[in-house]
Image (tube, helix red, strand yellow):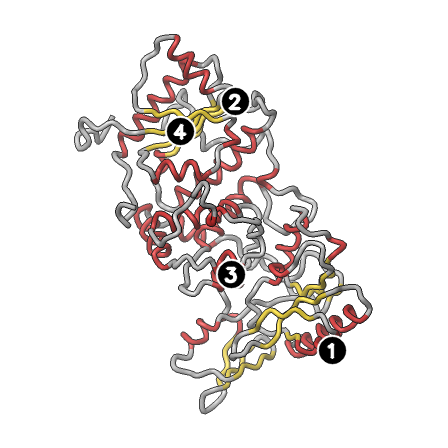
Amino acid sequence: MTGTNANAGWEPRIVAFLCNWCSYAGADSAGVGRMQYPASVRVIRVPCAGRINPFFILSAFRRGADGVLVSGCHPGDCHYISGNLGARRKFALMARLLGHLGIEEGRLHFTWVSASEGGRFAEVIETVTERVRELGPARRNAGGAR
Amino acid sequence: MSGAGLSARIAEAASRLLSEGSAEVVIGFEQGSIPMRATPCLVTDPSDAGRLVWNAFCANNLARYLEPGRKAAIVARGCDSRAIVELIKERRLKRSDIVVIGVPCTGMADPRAIARRFPGLRVTAVDESDGMLVIHGGPEPVSVPLDEVLHASCRLCARRNPVICDIPLGDPVAERDPGFPDVEAFASLPAEERRSRVEAEMAKCIRCYACRSACPLCTCASCFADSSQPQWVGRGAHPEDVTAFHVMRAMHLAGRCAECGACARACPTGVDLSILNRRLASDVSELFGCRAGLDENAPQPLAASSMEDSQDFMLDPGRKRE
């Protein structure tokens, strides 16, 4: 971890949108397996990665998230056949657009975690938390408080 | 063919289509009330067809004026036709309801660029010939090549001839697709500078929604920006709300935007929306291999998906970071 001195004692707030059919159960399985991971995530359960409107991601940032994680089912495993594939196209554009606008890339993460991958879920949370911690608190828009 | 010759042929075609009943309305341009402006014009009476003109100041995208279920003839160049193709793909319009009067286009002149070129000149009229604009208003007429005063979107135009066409008028012009030099130039700036450029653009916005009104692909019956339940985005000019509005509008247009630039031309404060829309168009082209409106038969990229889509952007905790 680099750059933690300036942000000593600071814990990032990460909003995680998890698909009900895989990643949410994956988080459960991490819990059942008593795996340790940073307590930085706030989980929001969604019916499918395809349910996630890019607006959810923007709203999370606007309302104080330092990072956002979106996790769905591995390609081919979608409960709704292809919700995750459609989402992947949307997310690919969203990720690039936010980077283009100058938002640090390390704040927004997409991944796949299946219901049985509790270990992977813990790893994902660790990786995302570490990346966001390196970046420090998200800069709020110059316009001040709403 | 000169603008005047095309105007006469457009008027002739419009009059014929209206009198034989193949269209209820002809959508074209008429001379605006001030110089260097052409106004969209909906002609329903054959005797009014003479009002239709075609010149270097036809800034709007006429596809905006098509309505479902109304048999319409529309004067369309590349960008108008790209929007029409997208609307047909979305089944908002029926191909059989539309008669496309196709015109080739060498780009539209930007009155602001002309004002910059000739500071202080009070333009009274503009004539066109062979790619030159002859501008009247000073003691002597002055001339400037059209290519040097084009709208930004026209300089970067990927399609100058109509994609679909029923009544072709004029000789097709050579296509030249310049790619995305603007997107590459912006992307090469440091992130901090990109962010401050975006903030500066967004700060100009007064939330008048002229961009949305001018956009041929902004076809939602009710816009998320007007929704109060839930209120996706605040109504005011707070920078966060403004940015959220424009980013979400751009996302809604991803893979559909005809890149006509009508939004930027309609903007009273000159917000450069191409920063958002052109980036998305370039990404769609790179990731999914398509450009909006250029292929009638290709599915819209965000209405399709493939197992083979790139997922390089995704996080894989097992993979080492570079």
Residue at label 4? A69
Q: CA distance from mark 1 to mark 3?
A: 34 Å
| Residue type marked 4 | Leu
Q: CA distance from mark 3 to mark 4?
A: 35 Å
Residue at horizontal 27%, vertical 34%? A135
Q: Nearer the viewer, mark 1 or mark 4?
A: 1
Q: CA distance from mark 1 to mark 4?
A: 62 Å
Q: Earlier in the sequence, mark 1 or mark 3?
A: 1
Mark 1 Cα-neighbour bin, 10 Å: few <14, some 14–19, many ≥20: few
Residue at label 1? B47
- Dot 2 lies on which element? loop
Residue at label 2? A74
| Residue type marked 3 | Ser
Residue at label 3? B153
Q: CA distance from mark 3 to mark 2?
A: 40 Å
Residue at horizontal 70%, vertical 45%? B297
* Viewport quadrant of the N terminus of chain B: bottom right
